[in-house]
Image: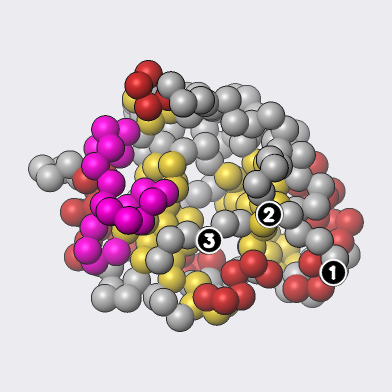
Amino acid sequence: MKYPRTYHLPFSPGTTSDDRILHGDWFSYYKGKEVVFTEKLDGESTAFNITDVYARSHGAPTRSPWSRNLWEPSNGLYWQIKPYIGENETLYGENLYGEHSIHYSKLPAYWHLFAINDGERWYGWDEVKEFSQIIGVPHVPELYRTVLTDESEVKAIIDEIMTHPSTYNDTEKEGVVMRLTISYGIDEFPNCICKWVRPHHVQTDEHWTRNWKKAELIQY
């Protein structure tokens, strides 16, 4: 299944006209529950299942040059991971092979796992982390974890997080994703995960596909 659109927090400054924004009593779904804040990386959302690797459109497998690191027949990451994917599982990750609006100077790998579902439920965050260890790829950086008691805590935590640079460079992050750490049903997605995005984030345009640049990995 295609990864659902993630709702913006009401105070997220990076919304556009077609974004979905949380309203009303949104915090009631998070109050008293453990959440994790992860870094929103600036790449292309991709999905792996037992059939192939897919990008934003799931109409056909991706074969774009900026996702070559995933589908390349000889050494693409997808073919290395495929034996670990269950029949009904879909793995979702951020592919940073093609540089977008943010330059990452400390990138250890191109593909970062951020979610898994089996058609019935979204896996808990600790399950996602365990799976990333099993398949030998990183998950998106975990920034903070806590049990929320008041709505004001969310903004305070994000404000503090955004005073620090990205995990993978010395400048600001694209944003933050907040999700419940527990597993939840497929239909519960809109009430269990949300995001905050920096203002004026999108800087790529229709010419990106012609002029894209391969990101560089850090050399140890």
Give the colour scheme shown.
Answer: secondary structure
Q: Residues within 10 Å of mark 3 (few under 14, many from 20)?
A: few
Q: Nearer the viewer, mark 2 or mark 1?
A: 2
Q: Which residue is at the front of the view, 16 or 107?
A: 16
Q: Which x, y percent locates residue 32?
A: 79, 74
Q: Earlier in the sequence, mark 2 or mark 3?
A: 3
Whether residue 173 is visible = yes
Q: Secondary structure at mark 3?
A: loop
Q: Against 205, is 186 above or below? A: below
Q: Against 82, is 202 above or below? A: above
Residue at image position (27%, 68%) is: 85
Q: Against 179, is 44 above or below? A: above
Residue at image position (62%, 25%) is: 171
In the rendered structure, which amino acid carries the disc numbered 2? Arg
Q: Which residue is at the front of the view, 54 or 206?
A: 206
In the rendered structure, which amino acid carries the disc numbered 1? Asp
Asked if the residue at tag 1 contacts the one at tag 2, i.e. Cβ–Cβ closer than 8 Å, the answer is: no
Provide the residue designation for mark 2.
Answer: 20
Magenta highlight on residue 62: yes
Whether residue 136 is visible = no
Q: Secondary structure at mark 1?
A: loop
Q: What is the C-alpha distance between the residues marked 2 and 3?
A: 11 Å
Provide the residue designation for mark 1.
Answer: 25
> Please, what is the dominant secondary structure of the magenta stretch?
loop
Q: Which x, y percent locates residue 165?
A: 64, 31
Q: What is the C-alpha distance between the residues marked 2 and 1?
A: 15 Å
Magenta highlight on residue 166: no
In the rendered structure, which amino acid carries the disc numbered 3? Pro
Q: Which x, y percent locates residue 18?
A: 65, 47
Residue at image position (81%, 61%) is: 23
Residue at image position (46%, 38%) is: 43
Q: Give the magenta range.
A: 49-69
